[in-house]
Structures are given as C-alpha cells and as structure tokens.
Image (tube, rainbow, N blue to C red):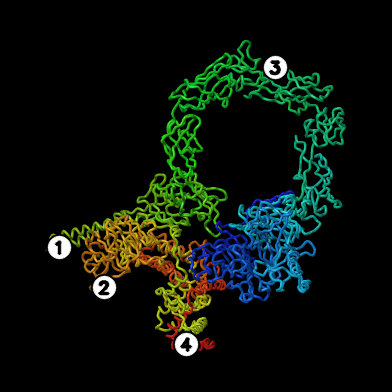
Amino acid sequence: MGEHFLKIFWKVAVTFVVICPALSQSYIKYKDPTGNFSTLVYDSESENIFIGGLNKVYRLDAGDLRLIVQGDIGPKLDNPECTTPPPAECAFERTFRNNSNKLLLQFGDKIISCGTVNRGTCEFLYSSNLTIIGQLVSPPVINTDGNSVAMITQNSGDEPNLYIGTPAAIDPDLPPFTTRSLVDFEVQKSMLQKSQKKASDSHIRQGFKMDFIHGFNSNNVNYYVVVYDENYSQTTPNYQTYISHTCESDQTYKVSYIELPLVCNHKGQKYMLAQSAYLANRVPSEPNTSSLILVVTFGMSENGASSIPERKSAVCVYSLSDKIEYSFLNAYKECAQGNTTFKTVQWAGSDQHDCKANDLWEQLLVDEQVPYCHYLEQIPDLGGNAPIVADAIYQEDDTLFTSVTFQYVDEVQESVIFLGDDKGDLVKLRLNSLTSAQKYETKTIDAGSAVIRNGLMLSKDNDSIYVTTKQQITKVPVEECEQYTTCSECLGVGGGVGDPYCGWCTLMNRCTRKNDNECTGAYKDGENRWLNNFDQCISITDIEPANLPSDMQIELTLTVRSLPSGTPQSYFCVFEDIKTMPVLAIDNTKESPTLTCETPPEVEIVKPDGFRKVNLSILSNETNMEFVSSEFVFYDCSAFQDCTNCVSSNFACDWCIYENECTGNSLKCKLQGVVGGKGNAQTNATKFGPDKCPRLKKRDTEILLSVDTKRPIEVVAQNLPMLETGQEGYECVIGEEVVRAEVMVNNTIRCEPKQYSYSDQEQEKPIVLKVRWNGNFMIDNPDKVTVTLYKCDVNRTTCGKCLLADSKYECGWCNQVMCRYKDHCQNGAPFLNGNVVCPNPKIISFSPLKGPIEGGTQLIIKGENLGLAFNDTESIMVDNVNCVTEEEGYIPSEQLQCTLSSTPTRLSSWVKVKISKESTTYSATSEEKYSFVIPEVTKIEPTLGPMSGGTDVILEGDNLDAGTSVNVTIADQPCLDIQRKEDGTIHCVTSPVITNVTIGDVVLMIDNGKDDSNVMFYYKTDPTITKILPGHAIASGGTRVQVKGLNLHVAKKKILTMTIDSQEFRGECFNASSLGVSMTCKAPNISAKFMPLEEANYMSIPEYGFILDGVTKYQSLDGEYPPFEYFVDPEYFDLEDNEYNKNEDENLIIPGRNLNLASQKEDVQVKIGKGVCEVKDIGLLHLTCKPPEDQPKSLDGSDGAAEVIVYHGNLNFSVGLLKYYKWPLPLPLEQMIAIAAILIIVILIIVGFCIYRCKAGRSEQKITQFRQQLDQLEMKVAQECKEAFAELQIEIELPTNEEYENQGIPYREFRSCILRVLFPDQPDHPILRDLPENGVRSEKVDMGLQQFGSLINNKTFLLLFIRTLESQSSFTIKDKSNVASLLIVVLQSKMDYATDILKVLLADLIEKGVDQDRARLLMRRNESVAEKFVSNWLSFLLHSYLQESAAAPLYRLFRAIKIHVERGPVDAVTADARYSLNEGKLIREILEYETLNIYAIGLDPAKDPVEVKVLSIDTIMQAKEKIMDALYKNVPYSQRPSPDTVELEWKNTSGRLTLQDENDYTKGDGEWKRLNTLSVYEIRNGASITLINKQGCNSTLTHPRYMNSHVTSSPSRSMSPMLGQGDSENSVKVCHLVKHGDNDNQEGDRGNRMVSEIFLTRLLYTKGALQKFVDELFATILNVRREAANVPLPIKYLFDYFDDQAKENGITNPEVVHAWKSNSLPLRFWVNLIKNPDVIFDIHKSDAVDACLSIIGQTLMDSCSVSEHQLTKESPSSKLLYAKDIPNYKKLVAEYYTEIQRRPAVSDQEMNRVLGDHSTKHKYDFHEQTALNELYYTYVRKYREIILSGLESDEFAQKNKLSFKFEQVEHLMNETNV
C-alpha cells in the first residue's frame, strides 16, 4: 500500500512540475505607450537596464523590469538653424522640440545620452536617478539625420576614450569618425592637431547618407558596420554594406582605416543592406578556426537601388580573423602588388588614385599577421570593390530581421542565434556550422511592433533575453523546456530541429536543460540519462507476447530504446494499479536493451468487453518515477457472449457452438461445432472466422407489422446447427413476446403468427429480432435485423395528416373520423387513401391580422385539410382582393402562404380558401377578419443623432404592427436592425450620412405601402470630447466622471468603457447638458481585474473609451489621452460616537481610509435611516456631513436610533446607529440667532431710552431720526444673521485638482526660488552677477577672494569665524541670517562640506542649550547662524522634492484662498475682506454690492473676449487685476504686463472712457477721499472692457455722471495698506470701503458698523470652504500616504542627527527632540513656505490672502507643538477656529516623526552622493566670488581685529598658519583700495 501511494505521489508531483509552468506563457514586460524606445544599455553590475526613448531615459530592474526611475531629456528649447545650444545666443527663435535619444552609453556611474535636439549634442546623467549632471554645453556629437554608434574603450594605464561613428554631415565639426573626450565631448586636442577628422568638407555632398549599423572593439581595433551609397555623386544609387576598421594607435584616422564591402549570398541573390550585427564569441567546432564571429542580418535591395530593404532577410556569419581581417590584410598586399581593384576611400576626401606596385611595400607586408594595423602612409584609407562574401546560413521571405544576438550554450557545446524581426517576433536559430543554421522556434512578443535595432540583449546569467520594441521591453527565457511534456515534443521542436537548450531527462520523465540540478546524471555520457536527439527518444518498442489471458502468468520481454544503464534492481514493471513486479533480468548486448519481468498472477476482466488494456510502465528505483510506458492487453475469452465477437477478436479465442461459449482451449468442444479465432494454438477448429458463425442474414427490406395484426415473420439464417437429440427447437423473441419458430427451406426461419402491440404514443417502434435455440443459445444477429411495429392513428388526427403517411404503412381515413390500417377499417365504411382531397377544410388562424392597402403583405394561413399538394389550392380571397399563393411557405394540409394584392380603400373582411382536385371542391372561411389599413409614423424618438449614425430610434404611430416586411429610411439611408415591439413601436438604428446632410425625412415602407410622413430626423455633427475630469476613479466604480466636449447630447447611447486584458467594463453616462458641452458618466466597476502597481495604491488603464452611438473616434482613447487611473476602494469605519448633539456638533464626522484618493463629495451619499446627511466635505481620513434637523426614522419606520449607511460610488458601508441627543429645552440655531439679535436690539433700545431721558429737551425730529436708525440697525443685524446662516448651509465650489493641473503651476526656477529664501528683501542681490572686471585691480581681487575662499574651506577657520562673529553684541540677528545665506552660496559646490559644518554648529548649539536648560528652544528663533543655515540647507536640498510632489497642494490652497476671498468685497486700502480666516481682517460693515459678468479684451484684440466676474464695488485696480488674472491665467506673474503699465477702457453709448481709481471728481467725504469703483462708472452686466497700454496723456470724455466736466487720470496707485498720501496732517486720506484711522467712532460711520462678533460666522464659512485644501496640504507635508511616497533623504538624515545628539547629551525627554524636529522642518521650512508661497511660485500674494495664510501657518505651528493649549471662550478666534482639527494634526505629526525614525538609517556615503549630485547640478547658479566679496567687505573688514586675535590664540589655527593666510588675504584685498 505504501509503495503504491508513493508511486501516485510522484506521478502527481511530476505532472505539477511539468504542466504548471507550461500553463503560464505570459512574460515579464514593461510598457510605455509614449516611450518610442530607440536604444538599450544593460548594466550587468547593478543588473539594471537603461532605455532611451522620446524625451525620456528609463532605468529598470533587470529582474522584474520594474521601473526604478525615469529621467527627462526633453522637450528642449531648440532651433535647427542655431549652431550652438542654449544658453548661447541664437538669431533664430527657439521652441520646445522633442528630443529622441539616438545614443545611450554607460560610463562608470554615469549615463551618456545623445539626442536629436541642439544638432546632436550629448549630456551626462546620473545612473542612479537619471538627472542631468551640471550644465555642460556639449558640441554636436552625432548627426541627427541617421543612426550612429559609439563605444568606450580603455587600454591599461590610459584614459578611456569615446569613439563615435555617425553619418557624414556638411558640418566640418561633425566628421563621421571621431575620438572624443569623456569630460566635455570635445574632439581630443592632442589628436585634433593631427587632423583627427575622417572626412573632408569638399567631398561630402548634400544628401550623402550613411547608416551606422554596429560598432565594436577587438584587440585594440575599432570596427564599424555601415551602409552608404557608393555612387553618392552619381544619379544611379548603389547602396552597399561596408565593414571598416581603425586601430586605436592610429590617432589620425588616416593610416589604418580600411573598408571593404560586406555581402551575403543566397541562391545567387546578393543581400547587401545590413540591418543589425553582433560580435559573438563561439567555441569553434572546426579545428583551426577563430572563436570570434560577426553575425549580420541583411535585407534585400535589388541592385542596391534603395536604402529601404524589401521584406526578405538573410543571415550571414563571418569569422573576424579568418574572413574579415584576412581580407583586410590581403587588400593591402594586393594594393602593394598594383591591383587596381583597391583604391583610397573617395568620400573621405583622399586623393583618388589606383594602387601601384611597390616591391618594398609588398616585402614589408609578407610576414604580417592579423589583425594587422597598417602604418604605411603611402597607402592611406584603403577601400575597394572586392567584397567579403559569405553564404547565408538562413534566409526567410516576408520578414525583416532588425536585431540579432548570439549565445554559445556551453553545456551542450551548441550555438544559438536570436533574431528580432519587424513583426515583433523572436526567432531562434540552431547554428550547425558557419555555413548552416536551422530555425527551431518563433515566438510573438509584441505583435505588429518591430524589434528595434540592437534591441536584443541577454541577461547576466544568460538565462533570459530582453526583446525591445518601440513601446515595450519583454524578458523572455532563452528556453522553456518545461512546456514540453513528452520526449517527442521535447526533442522534436521545430520539426525535429530541436531546441539546443532542451533534452529529455529519461529517469525524471521531463524536458530539462543539461545540468545535474534539473536532471541527475545528465553528464554521464553513454548512460542515456539525458537525450537530445529526436531519434533517441526512449520508448518500449516491443513486448513479447503482445497480449495474455488474464488468468495466465508468464515472463514478458520488453525491448526499450535508450534505456538508461542499470541493474535489474534499478527498475520495476508497473502494471497500472494492478501490481508492480520486479525486473528479473536486463540484456544490454542488443542495440536496444531488453528487460524481463513477470505478469501479475490474475487480472480481473470486465464483461462484456472481454479484454483490458493496461498501462505497462517501467519505474526507476532511483527516482521512484515511471519514465517510459506502453500498452499491454489482458483478455478473457469467456467474457465474449456470442460467436461473432469471440472469433473477431485479436485474441486466441474459439467459439464452441454446441457448448455456446468462447474459450481459449477448444479441444474440449465438439469438433463439428468449433469456429476458430485468430492464432489459438490449442484449437481443433476446421472452420474459421465470423462468417462461419450461426447468424441471421442481412435483409434488403424492413419488416413492417401494424399493431394488433396477426401475421408470420420470416428471416433467412446462415450456418444453423443441426439439432441433436434432447435439444430444444428454435424460438423468436420480439420484445417481451416469445413465439415458436421453424426452419424452412434454404435456412429460412418462420416465426408463428401473433398480434403485437406497444404502449408508447409513437408512430413506429423498431425492435431487434432475436432467435434462440436449445433454450438460451442465441443465433448471432450482427446486422441487427429489426421488426418495426407501427400505429396509423398516432399524430394523424386529421384526414390530411393521415393521407400524408407513407404508402408502405397502408393507412387511410376511415369513416371520416380516424386514421386506420386498411384491414382494421370496418367493411363498408368509407376509406380514403392516396392522392385525394379531404373534406371539411378549416382555417384555424392567419397572420398578420392587418396590412397596408397597397398590398404586398405575405399572409400565412394555418389550418386543417388544406390540400395534399400545392396545386390543390384553387383560390384565397379577402373580400374581393385576391391573394396570390406561394409554394415557398406551403406545408401540405396544414399551412398556406400567399401575397395580398392592393385595394383602393380601407376595408375589413374574412379570409376565404377554396381547395379542389378534379371535380371535388371544398371551401373554408376564417373566424376573424383581415383589415386593410394605412400605417402612419407620427413621432420619432430621439429626433436627432450623430452623423456617424448608430442611434437607436423609436418610431411611434398608427398601424405600425401591420404587414410582414418593414423597411425604414432616414435621409435616404437605411435604418438598420429593425425590430417590431409588442407595444406597436418600431425600433431601428440609424446609418451614417455624409457631412452635408443635416436633416432627413423618416420614410416607412411596410410591404408595398409607403408612409412619407412629415416626421423629420436631424443629423448633428458628431460629438467631440475635449476633457475628461477627473481621470481617476475607485476600483469598484460608480464615482462620477465629468466629460467636456461638444454635441455630447447628440448621442443617445453614451457609455464609458474600460478594457483590461480584452475584458470590457461599462459605465453609463447621463445628464448631458442641453448644449452638449458636458455629461456625467459613472466609472465602471473593474474590481474583478483591479491589480494596483507594486508599492502603490492605483493601476493605470491606457485602453478606455466611449460608446457614442456610431461614433468610432472615441471608442479607444489609448495614446490620445493620459491613462485612466483606478485607486484602491475607500473604507469607512464605525462611528466613534453614536450620539449626535446638533447644538454642539454641527456636522457628523465619519472616519475612514483612502476616502478622497479618487472621489469628490458628489460621489458620496450618506443616509441616516430614511433621512439624508448632506455631505459637506470629504478628506483622506474622514467624511463630514450635515445631518437633518430632526431625528430621521429608521429604515423600518420606527423611532430611535437609525442606521447610518455611506453610499460611495457602487459601494455601501454601514457605519453604525445614530441617535440624536435631546436637550430638555432644545434651542435650534435660528432661534439662538434670533434671540441674540433681540437681545442686541433690547440693549440698544435701553441705551436709546436712556439717551432719550437724558436729552429729553431735544426735538421730536431727533427722536424720530434715532428710532429710524435703530430700526435700520435691527434690520441689518437680522439680514447679516440670515446671510451668515445661508452661507453656512450652501456648499461652495472651488476648482478641482485637475483644473489646477491643466492650467499649470508657475514654479520659480531654482535660482529665483532660493534667492527669495536667502535674501527675501533683495530680489536683485549681487550674487546673481559676477564681480565687474577692473584690470589689475580685478586680478588682485580675484586672487584675494580665491585665498579667502580657501580659508572658508578650512573647517577650523570657518568655525572660528562664525563663533567669533556670534560672540559680538553688535552682530545682529539680521547679520546672522545674512552670513548664513552668504556662506551657503559660497559652499554651494561643496554641499558635503557645508553639511559637515552644519552638524558641528548644531552640536554646539545643542550643547549650549543643554547647559543653559534651554534645549527645547533650539531652532525656535533665528538666534544663531546655525538656525538660519538649517533653513537654507533644507531649501537647497528639498527644492526638487517640492516641485515633484509637495508644492502642488500649497499652490492649490493659495489659489483656493485667492478665489474665495475675491468672491466678496476686499478693501483696496486696508486689505480687510468679507471672507477671511483672520478676525482682524474682517470687514465689519454691511455692504451693498452685486456680482457682474463682464467681457475683457486683452492687448491683442484679435483674441476672443474672456468672461470675468467682478464686483460692482471693486476699485478700478482690483477689476484690472481680476481681468489680468483671467487673460493671463496660464502665464507666470512676472511675465505678465505690470498693472501700472496698462489701463482699462470702457466703450459705452457716449464713446470710450478710460477707467481710473482717482480723478478730479473722485467722491470726497471730509478729510476722506473714496476711490472710484465700477459702480461709480455705472458699469453693468455684460459690459465689454478693453485692456490697453497706458498712454502718456489720457484721453478725456464726458461721463453721464459729470456733464460738461473734464475727466483726467492720475498715476496708477499701489494698493498696499495705507492711511493717507499727504505729507501734512491736513492731507486727504484715501479710503475704499472702510474708513480706517483715528476717528473710527465718527458719527455717520456707526450707521453701517456693528460689533465684530456678528461677523465671526464668516470665519467658519471660509474655513469650511478651504478645509479640504488645508487637509491635503498637511497630509502632504506630513507624508500621510507613506506607502506611496518616500521621505526625502535630507529630512531623514537631519532627524537621525537630532536623535543621535539627544543620546550624546543624555536627553531622554522625547518632547525635546520632537521640538527640535518641529522647529527645524515645519517651523523653519514649511511655515515659511505657507506664509510666503511666492517664494516657490511666480505669483502675486495680496495682503488679504496673506492674512489667511498666516492663520494656516500658525495652525501648523500649533499642531507641531507638544504642549497643550487650554482654550476657553475668551481665547482668540484664530485659536478657536482650528481647535478641533489640531489634535488630529498632532497625531499625524507624531506618526510622521515615528515613521521617519523607523526607516533605515541614511549612511554618510548615501547622503554624500545626494549632496554631490546637488553640488554638481547647482554649482553655477550663484556667483561664489561675489558672495565671498560681500562676506569680506561687510563682516571680515568690520571684525578684522577680533578674527585675527582668535586665529592667533587657537592651537589648530596656529598649526595651519591661518593667521598668516588671513593677513595675506587682507594684503591683497587692501591693495585694491589704494
């Protein structure tokens, strides 16, 4: 039992190993649809792959092809006419042009990339992050009009050289062959002096094309394979392939250069256009041959007439030394002998002359060996027409091999050539010799996309090959042996050619490579362990004997081809699951060994088969696996039950007639009764074969017998046995009936007459006839002689059906009531049969019931007795309208078909049919009437559709269900897929129409009737899609996707589709706007196929589109639009508090995760029982909604807690039950506002009453006036409260992220951004410029500054310098900041050194803080150089991180604040605003204004006007800024025209008017002068305002407000907060909306001013509007999505340093380190950016926006604080505003710090690499000399004595003589001032 189980286990295990890999044929790949890959480099050391493409370079992991990093190399500013790249000046305008990579090389830790822009320049990239190194201005290196090659070689002890081969160009500085510097790509100077150019300008013609195929180096010789037109100067081209070589020792390219044609022959045809080449190292199979071979693929070009090959390919192999180098050496020898076939190279510019005989040269060349480096200048650059020819090893039509590589398979000593073709296939060749190869496999890798040149590359372990096409790189195993499950499949690959890698491991019974790991003993030669020849396949070729009786046990002899060597004990014979038998002997003396084993003692045979086929296999005792098998048969003669089967078998069986049995031993049977079988040695038979068996003879006619009819049955038999005494006679068995039988003359058996019947309701029942004798001895019936019983009346219920029965049954219609057999009809009763007419025809139904009066309707009539033949129908009539009969639909007796004629009018009548034959006629009339009607279309829905058709339309009208055939045309085009519905409508699909068709008639044709109604269908221009927002959704779909475009309403069927792995997912689109400019779609649910990218939470779907009726343009957007992104589904968690107090908690907060990754609040619905919770906001981690005022009822209608369900797209989450908290005396918000208003009114009334009592003597007029003021105040308070309440309830819409991204973010460049960090008040700081030159004095300064720079680079000096300055009381905080900024500029090229200094300064600061017990305050203020240095250091190193990810949310927040603030009034003077986060900046007055939509025209009047929203109380400057924001919304602020240089011009009925903030008629109010607003000029909605350049003298115009007055302009005013413009106390003060000054309580002002607390709700309103932007910014800053983003290394490095310093100084309080981190990163870096976004963005920040940003910055500061702030009702509103949010933010801060601490430490080496990259990239951004100059003259000169004293007293300074060096600097610098 155990042995059997183990055998089965091994079977299953091997099957799994062999089959499972074969099931998976998908390969690892990386794809970029926009990649346009062109070059490939494999770094075997790091196992990374670098790919060059369009505008990008990619770095992939060679293992899984995972994208590690992607670097940008374009687009770049360029103009083909410019001779030098930027920043050099060019007379032609440069535009951004795509940069396609043409050359890609690896050089150490750098990547060299050469592209198509800037005339083929090159640049260095860091291989780690693919960023460009420095600002190198490269000269042109390659010709961009063709293909180039390059190689880097290095001899021992020499500098590496870059060798370039590029197509010849007219440019003299771009020769075809050059050796270039690997520093700046310049041609090497030492070689340039020796004319290192391999071309002459005068000899290169325009249009001369060269195509470099391949370049390689061997034995210090450079080889190039190139194609060019050798007749380039003639009219008839002749493109040839040449191979050339130059020796590295030849620095002039003029002596050793030689080229000869390279030709590949196949059956008399020359293949001359090389497509790819590869230098391979092959272990030669032939003696005395070279191991290096050049494999080249060629294309065919008839007579070389074209450089574009035909799709015919050949592959040739050339030995490098024996063929190529030998031909080169021989060419030199032939030339020296005067052979004129060889000559100098014409295109290279050499003087053309034939070779001349020269005995000296010839003698010098006699003993030269290959490779030969020529040095005789008498024979320069040799070429010729003697080609190097090889015969093709392989040729194939209808393909073009574009790439080739080679591998020598050492384990089998075979060579394989891999080819990539233009169809995206990988072709594998088995190299038999240098003249022969066979294809054994073709794999389609990227169908339809050509493999790029040299796009095949082997992996480091040689187990995989990388196949690269334009958009995809695929990793393919070099072999897939495991896919073959049999030896013949394994060794028969390619029609028997065989895969060189694969062989059959016999004892493992699997296809493997030849190694001991996969196949034990594979290397044991001669033991047949591993087979690799198809003819060797192991098999059992013979078994002796081939079969055996199941009860017999003998020894079997098995002949096994390729049996592995072994002893009998090594193997077992396995008879399936019957028994395993040991091998008794093995005979290895024969060609095919034999082995002997016994059969099982007995095998069970299942009757009646008589035999059993078993799988006989051989089991290896070594592997415990069955490795070869064959079929073996056990049989049992006794299992055969009749003579025919017994003697027909292949076994040794005889049939004994008188014993009625089959036996293998017939000697015991009666001799005369034995029928012999095949090959039975123990037989006494005299007759053999089934023909001698007793059997019934086959009949030619069937035996028919009607039931209940008594009739004898007779059959003829053969070989009937003679009955012996005592044996019973013959009997017939028919079904269950048994009757006696007798044998007649001629062996006829006659069964006695008997009535038979059957119960089944079937017309006939066949029964096999059985004849037996002697009781149960059966006579064989091999031909199945059958008796057929039948019934006439079954399914023949009418006369017509009865008479249609086959005449052989002799059935007829008896007595006009039933169908009977003729003998069963009573005598004298009528009996109809034959071809007669049945009486009583009947119409049961007809269709259709109505049709058009024009006729043509095909009428189908069903009934009974409607004639036995088509001609029996005499006529069919409807009233007097004839119906023409048709044979097509005629069914005898049951159905008639005819076509109705026309009738002039509507009518309705019965259908009448006449049936006749000869003189007999019968008629039938329908019970229902047929109606002639007029079909009419009255309506079509929809009424319009796209010109591309495909619209499902519905026709409605009268009698549309009439008739049979329907045809609809719309605008003369057929309407397709017509369907008639049960509701009487017709559905069809419109056809496409030509473009000039816009309207068409709907024409309905029913049969012959035509309805040319007045119903019209309108064809509209096809829908177009311009924008899809957002381009993402959740995996489960259902979220909204907004589609923008034109005519979207035209299509009826609108569906968004996503296609993943050929499976389509659909989402409906709806709500198309009436103008068709937008529609909403629901994202399809793709969760079944959702597989997010590794270490990401989303997947990209490039293949998506829209079904818009018949419009095909947008069915696939692949490549036209960015890929659609699906993010992980959101998750909602249970409510933290199940009780809702609407008086305390205005909103309900639902926690979750990944909530807004791909969703907006419109995608979410929250229900509380039967009520709806209005969604206010959705953040990453929580959703906010506003519950109903009253407790909703639960879903079952009961009171109490109700279930809260969140519906998010297609998902829904139950997050718990919610119950409202009930106050004893509930006070809703409206009542509280009303009560507050009433209290205020009461107070004011009391105050008024007191005033009244005190001033009772005043006049009644004063009292009335005061009461009116109180009434007005009361109304304004009520109005403000109502407006505030409404604002809180109305959702505000701000632009989405996609809208910001589409507009673009105006980032400042690194230099501009950093300058604002270093010197915020000096935008034009001197460090932007170099020091001015001034002759000798300039040289002195340079020397002095260089030495001063050397001192700064001395760590001892720099630290002493900083400490000395900081110790001086006169060294202010501003000085410290300035020094820190100047130092970071000086050290910008040595950031590693700067970091080292920073660490020392921080350590000093920390130590000082610990000593003074002020450690927690570190970095809190700018009290030291170190603190400012940290800010600068972070700004330098995090700039790229900001632009890549972190800055975008800040910009979105800034834009949201700006838009929100500008929605309401903003005071142009004080910057107070209606909407703000800052209580101090709220406008405390109620202002009357309206929003105006005006149309702005820019400086270019040709451009369309832009709609702009402004306020009626905006000043002219404010309106101007809003207009410029709209006109220049995608233009950085610094590139816009200045507002002071332009003016606004308004054209009204009176002419043109220039709008100004102030003029002579500006409204005055005492000492105040109020700025003009749009309302002053009476500008209304729809007005057009033009932006014009400011004129020196403004035009004047009469304004309706100032009749006959002169309007003048005043200079543009800067709207900074200010109180007045005059110099004296009596000067007029300027105001806009609010008078802000000393007289706030002046009478007249209080009428509009109220207590500030009334306006605090505006703070909440603004906070709510901006909440999601604040959340997004804080989430980005605190790296909430940690799974998708990495913490920048500088932050990790700095935080780790703080942790280390805490340990060194014994600080155990975690709050201290927390404070250090918060003070350094959020406080000094992030808060500064939040408050000053104009540092990184090119924007204008207004004071009103600045006030809001300050509150947000303060919130971040509070969130990073570890101390708890106790808030009360008296706390400032700025603190209370974010009081509930700060605890959540604090939690994020703590998690962020913890996450950083958990990450692996950043090593100094890793950090230094980052610092080095940064230094190289930005070393020239600022002028270091200028910064040194500023340091020296500002601080060194001032503190000279103290610094010098410190140097003289410091031990290390003395040792390094720093004081002396300092004095030398002083001497040089002082000389310049003499």
Q: Nearer the viewer, residue 528 or 833?
A: 833
Distance, label 3 to label 2, CA atoms, is: 141 Å
Secondary structure under the numbered disc 4 in the rendered image: helix
Give the percent coordinates (x, y) of residue 1428.
44, 75
The local secondary structure at tag 3 comes to: loop
N-term mark: 3 or 4:
3
Return the residue at label 2: 1622
Does residue 47 appear in this view? Answer: no
Could you tell me how far apart the alpha carbons at marks 2 and 4 are, in whole angstroms? Answer: 50 Å
The residue that appears at 52% across and 17% down in the rendered structure is 923
Nearest to N terminus: mark 3 or mark 2: 3
Marks 3, 2: nearer the viewer: 2
State the residue at coordinates (50%, 25%).
900
The image shows residue 467, relative to residue 1687, as above or below, that is above
Please give the residue where the numbered disc 1 appears in the rendered image: 1253
Is residue 1135 among the parts visible in the rendering?
yes
How far apart marks 2 and 1 lie (CA) works out to 44 Å
Tell me the quadrant of the picture where the C terminus can be found: bottom left
Secondary structure under badge 2? Answer: loop
Q: Nearer the viewer, mark 3 or mark 4?
A: 4
At numbered mark 1, what does the secondary structure look like: helix, strand or loop?
Answer: helix
Q: In this figure, which residue is indicated by the disc labeled 4?
A: 1866
- Between residue 1084 and residue 1625, name the one nearer to us: 1625
As rendered, which of 1285 and 1223 lies closer to the eye? 1285
Q: Earlier in the sequence, mark 1 or mark 4?
A: 1
Examine the rendered structure and indicate whether residue 1322 appears above or below residue 985: below
